[in-house]
Image: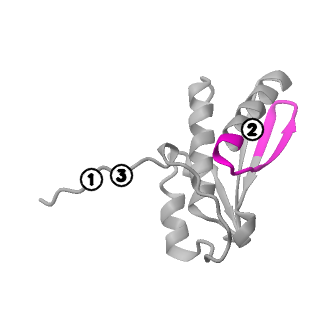
Amino acid sequence: MLWSPPMTSLADKTCVPCRGGIPPLKGKELVDIHHQLPEFAHWNVVNEHHIVRAYKFPDFRSALAFVNRVGEIAEEQGHHPDILLGWGKVEITTWTHAVDGLTESDFILAAKIDRLRQVSGHP
């Protein structure tokens, strides 16, 4: 049996600033990285261009607190999603504007957001 190093979780990686000039993820490569998300079934890939996930909360205050924590992660990573906040719900949409599509950084950010949600004790 061949030894292979353990795969690094997307949530343990760091977003890389994109300057453009690289092709966005498409096809099998996109499907493969999407399936690396622990909560991949909750993240919808839309037209191979962006990913979207909705989160539910018991009230506005907890949804707002989550949005603020997502904002902190986005600032740390230098990768900023679109965030829609409503009573008891938050919707996250992300893509890499510099390539007008998806890159690994979008999935890294998604994994970090999912981890944040799990750590907060909410499903």
Residue type at the position of mark 2: Gly
Magenta stretch: residue 78 in it?
yes
Would you say 107 lies left or right of 38 here? right
Picture coordinates of residue 31 (x, y %)? 53, 66
* Label 2 sits on residue: 71
Residue stretch rendered in magenta on the structure: 75-91
* Label 3 sits on residue: 7
Between discs 3 and 2, the one toward the N terminus: 3
The residue tagged with tag 2: helix, strand or loop?
helix
Whether label 3 touches label 1, CB < 8 Å: yes
Would you say 72 lies left or right of 4 here? right
Near mark 1 (Cα within 10 A), the count class, few <14, some 14-19 or many ≥20, is few
Would you say 26 lies left or right of 38 here? right
Q: CA distance from mark 2 to mark 1?
A: 32 Å
The quarter of the displayed image where residue 116 is located: top right
Whether label 3 touches label 2, CB < 8 Å: no
Near mark 2 (Cα within 10 A), the count class, few <14, some 14-19 or many ≥20, is some
The residue drawn where x is 62% and y is 24% is 120
Magenta stretch: residue 35 in it?
no
Picture coordinates of residue 52 (x, y %)? 71, 54
Residue type at the position of mark 1: Pro
The quarter of the displayed image where residue 22 is located: bottom right
* Circle on res. 5: 1
The residue tagged with tag 3: helix, strand or loop?
loop
Would you say 14 lies left or right of 106 here? left
The residue drawn where x is 72% and y is 55% is 94
The residue tagged with tag 1: helix, strand or loop?
loop
Between discs 2 and 1, the one toward the N terminus: 1
The residue drawn where x is 87% and y is 31% is 87
